[in-house]
Image: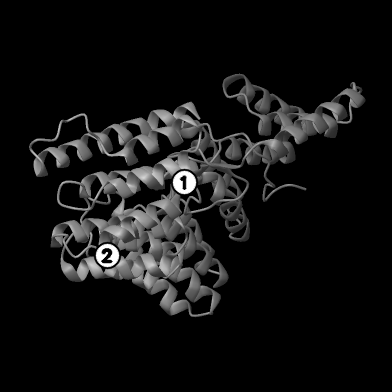
Amino acid sequence: MLELLLLLLPVAAASGWYTARRGMATKKQKKPQEISPVYFKGLNYLLNEQPDKAIDLFIELLDVDSDTVETHLALGNLFRRRGEVDRAIRIHQNLIARPSLSREQRAQALLELGQDYMRAGLFDRAENLFLELTELRLYNEQAYVYLLEIYQQEKDWLRCLEVAEKITVSHYPTLHNAIAHFYCELAEQMLSQQNIAAAEGYLKRAQQVQRSNVRALLLQGEIDYTRGDCRSVVRLLRQVEDYDPVYLSEVLHRLVECYRKLGLQQELFEYLQQLYERHHCTEAMLILSEMVADKEGESAAVDSMLRHLEESPDLKGLERLVRLNLQRGEESPRETLEVLLQSVMKLLDKQPAYQCEHCGFTAKELHWHCPSCKTWGEIKPQQGLTRSTSALSR
């Protein structure tokens, strides 16, 4: 209640001042302190903890004219930010209905009302208002940005591309990144319809817009994999290291599979060693430890995992170490290791596999479009925190 009072008292004061000012302007003989009784009635509502009635009264007290438009807009914005969308809509609708508004003021009210509708989930109404603004050629950039947000919510990727062409990067710093993902979304739609040629066309456009887009690379790799072109898959997926090494964990299982089908086990082993030396990638070490176990036995694999954990401790590596010790078959506190393994697995299950680097949103699955902050390509795999099944697991 105290917070609400602090927010409303300036409104009450402004209302009282404005009423007194108008009274002085129209009646010179009237004293400044002769304020409208309605103002005191509003204060009485506040003091008696009836803020809703006080708000309505103060809004009515402020006549809409050139001097009070900004006050109404500020009030509506305040209500929207506080989640009171119905009140914000009422204020902005009331503004738009006034014939005395200038063209600029009406456009500003339309922009605010469109945001109110978006907050209320009324996307069709918001879309109509923003389109009207683009026709008026006022607040174009802001209107297009909001339209882009609406079309993303509706997954209308073609309209997203159409609107994106009209937005400057200064109003949308990650525009090129978003456009590349729109093309990737269209490519996935085409793949679901078995239209490979159209999908590849969209992927080429995505890479033209953003050369280092990992998603386009992964999708093209999957297309080539379905064709049985393992050499192309290896060539493509090895580029992930140059684009964004954090996504290596997403492609190593496919790389391992293709190397094995090509009969290039030794080349795979050397590549993983180099990869681990450059990035200390946990996934690479997990696969290496399995290959070492096959070649030199569990003891050698245990030694390699111990060295890894000394330098880069993580739960996935610890889980692998426990499994290797259980596979050795030597006399050891097996019951203790079993309990430790179960504990590690429970910890892994509680850990998010992915996290958005922009807002901190966590998820168990990879999302290219963050459900929280709506950014594209910011959700990344978490190194060494989650369990995954290696392509070489037995």
**Residue 96: x and y, percent?**
26, 62
Pointer 2 local density, CA inside 10 Å: few below 14, some 14–19, many at least 20: few
Indicate the secondary structure of the residue bearing disc 2: loop
Q: Position of residue 55 (x, y in %)?
A: 40, 43
- Residue at position x 67%, y 44% in the image: 388
Seen in the image, is 183 located left or right of residue 295? left
Q: Is residue 139 visible?
A: no
> Tag 1 or tag 2, which sits nearer the N-term?
1
Percent across and percent down for residue 358 are 42, 40
| Label 1 Cα neighbours within 10 Å, binned few <14 / some 14-19 / many ≥20 | some
Residue type highlighted by circle 2: Ala
Quarter of the view holding residue 304:
top right
Q: Is residue 110 above or below residue 24?
A: below
- Residue at 57% in and 70% down: 226
Q: What is the residue that sits farthest to the front in this orientation?
A: 29
Q: Disc 2 designates what residue?
A: 97
Q: Is residue 186 above or below residue 18?
A: below
Q: Give residue 83's mark.
A: 1
Q: Which mark is residue 31?
A: none
**Which of label 2 and label 1 is nearer to you?**
2
